[in-house]
Amino acid sequence: MTTHNPLKDWIIRLRREFHREPELSFKEFKTQEKIIKILTDLGIEPEKIAETGVIATIHGRAPHPCIALRSDIDALEVSEVPTALNRDYISENAGVMHACGHDGHIAMVLGAARVLQEMRESLPGSVRLIFQPAEEEPPGGAARVIAEGGLDGVDAILGMHIFGYLNLGLIAFRSGSLMASSNVFSIKIIGKDGHHSNPWDCIDPILIASDFICAINAEINNRIEQTRYVLGIGRIRGGAQFNRTPDEVDMLGSFRTFDDCDTETIERTIEQTLGGLMERYRRDGIAHLPAYDLDVLHGYPVLVNDETFTEAAGSELKRTFPAVDCDAEPIFGSEDFASYLEQVPGAYLLLGTLNPEKGIVEGNHSNRFDIDEDVLMTGTEILQTIVLDFLERPEDYLRSAMKIETFAGSRTDTIDQTAAVKAMVLGVLHVEGFEYDPAKDFDLDDIEEYYLRNRGIFYIGLVDGEIVGTSAVRMMNDEKCEIKRIYVRTNFRGRGFGRELFTMALKFAEENYSTVTLKTAVRLDEAINLYLKNGFSIVKEEDGIAYFEKTGLAEPVQPVSMR
């Protein structure tokens, strides 16, 4: 005899109702209206956000800790095909379909909301609910939710995606990069048109485009491992006459990577390859041709799960659920949930719905895509499990906050704190297990000479009173400075402390100098990504060192007279 679960039945009913009325990005007005009514009926006060989205908060005994649950709500421009499964809930909006599982995401977050609202008086903190529009349409709805305050007061965030290629009930995720960035590039190649009977008077942009397509992946493979990116040309247009060389060819393509350094490398390689082709096809007597225009549009960033949060969530899920993969392979799909993870720690999970026994075999975005509705209750329980564990043990999910001590300098002041800085740095080196070696590290006397006496600054990062790292800015001349000494102790790495120390140094540098430089080893991909994301350009690579520069900043501060 089958036992009915009222919550499961309710979640399935909601999923089917949303499935029948799918709406495209930023057109989710009926979806928004329905979510608002459901939340109101549950006793949760909703607010509109990002035009067609909804946010709400379940208030427990205290405002913090606060964890957000996010669901995307938009559908795709796909015509759903009738199947044996969907006859009771097939899309009633012609040409639009929930072909990526967002209807299930809405139902699962509402299911978790119902449970958590019923137990709100026992919750140690609060839960933010985010129903986000326009995940499918870059630049996406996440940026608008963030800009309009959707994350205000949120300490961490959790998201989940139903995935048609994973077995039913499998929870898959990983710490670090889980999903790729998406980037679109368009290229216009400009040649010299003419008749095919006079090829010597023409520069054929179709030939140049063909050479580019043949060469680009090989050129990138010389710089990046093939497993770290994908690139393809999706459209090429040029010419209208069978016997005429056109003057232009347009190409449209995309590439995806798992880190910003690879994105920068691919962009440079595209430019260098195009530049080489322009030189190869150049002809005497034809000035300024061939030429090209390149435009790269960066879509969603790399989705990076927070290490501390992901490890804590993985441990709890393993205790509760039978099928958990905490080290899943990253996928080249992209998601604007990545934007939330750039603001607060959290994790994004993939939940499998593949079940051949029920005929659930189609992948996401197929016009026959469907889900095994048993997964909806599993997803609801996953969200509920992590929320409750986070609210009880937030310290296990969140990195310890770092306090930054500032030692500022000028051109004339005597620096009384230099000795304290030296003692701190010596302490770091000692704890790391090696004696100070000026040949390998840096002369501690230069702290005063290079940073504090020369319109510079030195930062020390501390956690619970313990030194974890340093960063500094030194003056090169009145207009130019260098960011140096970005260092984090080994057992504190991977927790964002280096990023914080760098950000402090960069803020000071940008406010006081018109040009900022820095350098790092080319093997340090994470550092390179950070610098590129903050507007630096690589000016050269030499002997394994990458040199960066950022120009056009503040008017430099005038030095104090030395009289």
Image: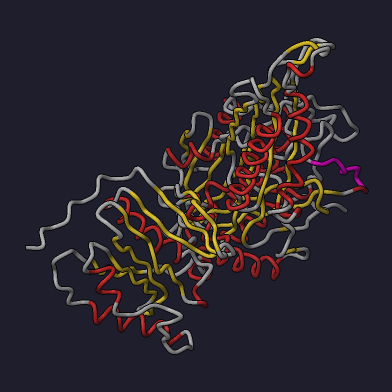
Residue located 57% across and 25% down the image:
29
Residue 39: image quadrant is top right
In-front residue for pair 26/226: 226
In the rendered image, the residue lying farthest to the right is 357
Look at the image and tell me in which quarter the C terminus lies: bottom left
Label the magenta part by its dominant secondary structure. Answer: loop
- Describe residue 194's horizontal placement relative to residue 472 as left or right: right
In-front residue for pair 108/253: 253
In the rendered image, the residue lying farthest to the left is 563
* Residue 259, above or below 83: below
In-front residue for pair 173/359: 173
Residue located 46% across and 63% down the image:
124
* Residue 77, above or below 265: above
**Is residue 420 something one can see in this rendering?**
yes
Q: Position of residue 512 (x, y in %)?
A: 26, 52
Q: Position of residue 300 (x, y in %)?
A: 59, 42
Bounds of the magenta span?
357-363
**Is residue 6 something one can see in this rendering?**
no
Residue 546 colored magenta? no
Residue 360 colored magenta? yes
* Residue 470, above or below 32: below
In-front residue for pair 113/143: 143
Colour mapping used in the image: secondary structure
Residue located 25% across and 45% down the image:
555
- Describe residue 437's horizontal placement relative to residue 25 as left or right: left
Q: Position of residue 201 (x, y in %)?
A: 73, 16
Residue 202: image quadrant is top right
